[in-house]
Image (spheres, rainbow, N blue to C red):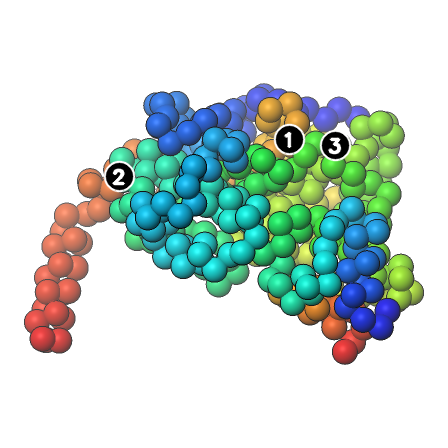
Amino acid sequence: MRTVEELIELANTHLGTALAPADAAAELTELAEWDSVHLLRLVALLEHELGRPVPVDAVLQARSLRDIWAVAVGA
Amino acid sequence: MAITLGPATDGRTAEAFAHPVRMSGPEGPWERVRVAVERHGSVVVHGRLEEWLPADLDDPRLRPLLGRDHARFQAMTHPQVRSRFVASRLLLKHVACAVIEASPESVELAYKPGGRPYLRGLDQIDISLSHTENLLLVGLTRRGWIGVDAEAKDRPMLGLGTENQVCTPYERRTLAQIAEERRNAALVRLWTLKEAYSKAIGQGMRFRFTEFGFSPQDRNVQVLRPDGAPGTGAEWAFHTCLVDRAYTVSVALFDAGFGDTDDTAAATMLDAGLIAALVEETGEAGDRAE
């Protein structure tokens, strides 16, 4: 996973969301269809995609999809 | 394995909770909310987003109603997020004001560092807020701390990798014993209980959901350690029920043991001597500032 856009595509494919690339920097609380269930499902998807554990504590501190991507890839 | 989703039937929780009260708009009637609080010390209220959404989101009367939240509201751009924000705050304020007998404009909603809402200056009352789809949910207690959470009862959660992020080893074992057609609903129930408890203790999701759990039965519910051993005592009460036949709603209530506060009216619940001392001190401070 090289870009946050790929993370957004992953979410849309598996979570049924309709996120746009422009949502990458938005506060998660500002995303209409985003909630805590989505967040944990995304963690599971990322772990499957990356083949390694994702630091959940750091993901929970994330304020945007870009933050989540950065935590997941260790950027 | 039985899972009960209905009005509280367990003696201990029945004392703490009434069945959630449906409120379809600011005009009330609010008597059921006040009666529930008088009888149980706590109340859970639910409403539909469309019922609590003002016709005009640019109405200037929203500014005093939302108070400090109005600036945050104005900065929001997504229509659905704005609608949910304003409707949920209006429901929350009206519930609180029905109990404390004050006007919504006179009550200020504030947030603790983790985002937990509280009513500034009204320490005797604790509140909690949740929403999912078009359901708005508010919990209020004068006994201690409260947390509420709601989720669509049939929201797919099972088999999507979330169990490992959500469940303790004990919960995964007990879930596996539940009939397959009821297992997802059982996981949704566990999820809402965990969210409600996390909100009540002010931790949100920072307290990992795999570090505490619940049993699959809705009787004598208590927090369990990852291995299923008891984790909390009688000071905590939990309950789960169905709302509008579509939503699983869970409530977590911590009884601080200070007893109930019969008088929560804003005009009378503050100690007169304390008020006099504060006014005097404020006046003196004001004089010095001038």
**Mark 2 belongs to chain:** B
Q: Is the residue marked by circle 1 packed among few (<14), some (14-19), or many (20+) residues within 10 Å? A: many
Indicate which disc residue B154 carries.
Answer: 3
> In the picture, which quadrant includes the N terminus of chain A?
bottom right
Residue B102 in the image: state x and y as whole percent.
26, 39
Residue kind at label 1, given as amino acid type: Tyr
Asked if both marks, 2 and 1, belong to the same chain, the answer given is: yes
Indicate which disc residue B209 carries.
Answer: none
Indicate which disc residue B102 carries.
Answer: 2
Marks 2 and 3, the one that precedes in the sequence: 2
Toward the viewer: B154 or B14?
B154
**Mark 3 belongs to chain:** B
Q: Where A23 sits versus B21, above or below?
A: below
Marks 2 and 1, the one that precedes in the sequence: 2
Residue B160 visible here:
yes
Residue holding disc 1: B247
Asked if both marks, 2 and 3, belong to the same chain, the answer given is: yes
Residue B259 visible here:
no
Residue kind at label 2, given as amino acid type: Ala
Cα distance in 3D space between marks 2 and 3: 38 Å
